[in-house]
Amino acid sequence: MTIQGGIFRVGRTGKFEAINPAFAKMTGYESMEEMLVNVGNLSALFVEKSDHERFMATLERDGRVQSTGFDLMRRNG
């Protein structure tokens, strides 16, 4: 089974704990390792600050965020 969607896990501070290869590719990185080295925190990827705030509020309230959509910046902007 191959997962085509981007999946990631962040801690309550927004720091990446894990990402899958699809998420790295969706954001313009060649590998998970390259992305983890270059992007330490999820907040750096959000196009809209309000989306990041909503994401983090849901994470704090529910302990997880699932099946939600938001715009993220790619590596090349």
Image (cartoon, rainbow, N blue to C red):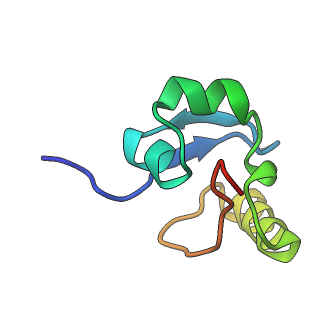
- Name the quadrant of the C terminus: bottom right
30 left or right, relative to 50: left
Report how many numbered discs are placed on residues in the image: 0
Of residues 51 and 35, the one drawn nearer to the viewer in this rendering: 35
Residue at the farthest front position: 76
Q: Residue at horizontal 63%, vertical 55%?
A: 74
Percent of width and height locating residue 6: 44, 54
Percent of width and height locating residue 17: 61, 32
Q: Is residue 62 above or below residue 13?
A: below
Of residues 77 and 35, the one drawn nearer to the viewer in this rendering: 77
Q: Residue at horizontal 73%, vertical 66%?
A: 55
Q: Is residue 4 above or below residue 69?
A: above
Of residues 34 and 3, the one drawn nearer to the viewer in this rendering: 34
Q: Which image quadrant for residue 40?
A: top right
Percent of width and height locating residue 31: 46, 31
Residue at the farthest left position: 1
Q: Is residue 31 above or below residue 77?
A: above
